[in-house]
Amino acid sequence: MTTIGTAQIKLLEKLCNAVSVSGDEGEVRKIVLEEIKGHADEIKVDALGSVLAFKKGTAPNRLRVMVDCHMDEVGFMLVGDDGEGLYRFETVGGLDVRQLVGKPVWVGRNKTPGVIGARPIHLTTPEERQRKIPLDQLRIDLGPGGKAKLGERATFATTFQRVGPSILAKAIDNRIGVAIVIELLKNAPGNIDLCAAFSVQEEIGLRGARVAAQYFKPDLAIVIDSTPANDLPVYEGGENIYYNTRLGAGPAIYSADIGTLSDPRLIRLLQQTADAEKIPYQMRQPGGGGTDAGAIHRQLAGIPVVSVSVPGRYAHTSTLISRMEDWKSTQELLLATLNHITPGLLKEERK
């Protein structure tokens, strides 16, 4: 059984506090390269900026297994300078504009502090207060004299915290996956050839994973991500009977999402491994959302794929919440599953 120790928690804190909005993943890439040095036979950074690491196994007739996570996060790009430290911006990835007003942000690689501003309630009409503030009326305010360059990225200025059994951070999606894949690479089993992809630009179209799959040419792939936990009370109807994934119930295994039908052989392997190792898990409700699996499974002549995610509340907002135990259980399940992969796995009937 694996543990989540002080070193891993400090690594996740560093990863979550890094600013790496899609297309500008350099800060996380640097951390990954430092962490995996000496733990892979081959390490390269591809043309899009993904980190691709290969660890050769020792057993005969090995399958090539790709494990993928994405390094990027949702955020903002500066697109216009109104002067006096005020900047127009566009969102990068799926963000709810209703939640942006008043949020502190970091701008650029120097993490210049700012705030997303709009007219205060005192200066609005009753009619305006009933409407969502459109994005073009919001500004990132760096204060008088504040300077930034157009094209620079910005993200929420939320620092990592441990609160009892929980983790709070801006980019648990998907730095928790990055931390897990680093651990898998450090403990790569000899029964497979492990292909670890730390992909870029997932939040804007699964771009890095598509290229990584072409490079690795794996026999199968497992995608590690963060998935929304829909476990808050439904006050209108009383008892909540509609949620699927929830905090504290272990890793969420996908059967289907908006872009992928998971390979049934890989779903069975995960379930059987979890049962044998007494690791808690949950089946994510089919539909909605997606992961890098949506790009990977359609490459080459087709790649069998499954996704496994750590549940988190408040996805794509300034602060996500996940549970330490779900992180630990996800890591345990994935490491145990990799150890159970045999050359005969893909010869089984798809049923």
Image (tube, rainbow, N blue to C red):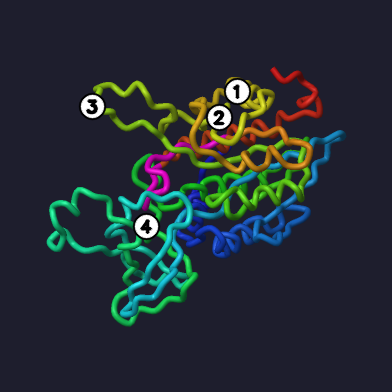
- Total labels: the figure holds 4
Amino acid type assigned to the residue bearing label 1 in the image: Gln
The answer to whether residue 68 is visible is: yes
Q: Nearer the viewer, mark 4 or mark 3?
A: 3
Q: Secondary structure at mark 3?
A: loop
* Mark positioned earlier in the residue sequence (3 or 2): 3
Give the magenta range.
308-321
Q: Is residue 264 magenta?
A: no
- Mark 3 sits on what residue? 236
Q: Which mark is residue 271?
A: 1
- Mark 4 sits on what residue? 158
Binning the other alpha carbons within 10 Å of mark 1 as few (below 14), some (14 to 19) or many (20 upward) gives many
Examine the rendered structure and indicate whether residue 218 appears above or below residue 156: above
- At x 32%, y 32%, the residue is 232
Give the percent coordinates (x, y) of residue 26.
58, 64
Give the percent coordinates (x, y) of residue 146.
35, 78
Q: Are marks 4 and 3 in contact (CB under 8 Å)?
A: no
- Mark 2 sits on what residue? 253
Q: Which of the 4 quarters of the picture holds residue 85?
A: bottom left
Amino acid type assigned to the residue bearing label 2 in the image: Ile
Separation of marks 3 and 1 at Cα, in angstroms: 35 Å
Separation of marks 2 and 4 at Cα, in angstroms: 28 Å
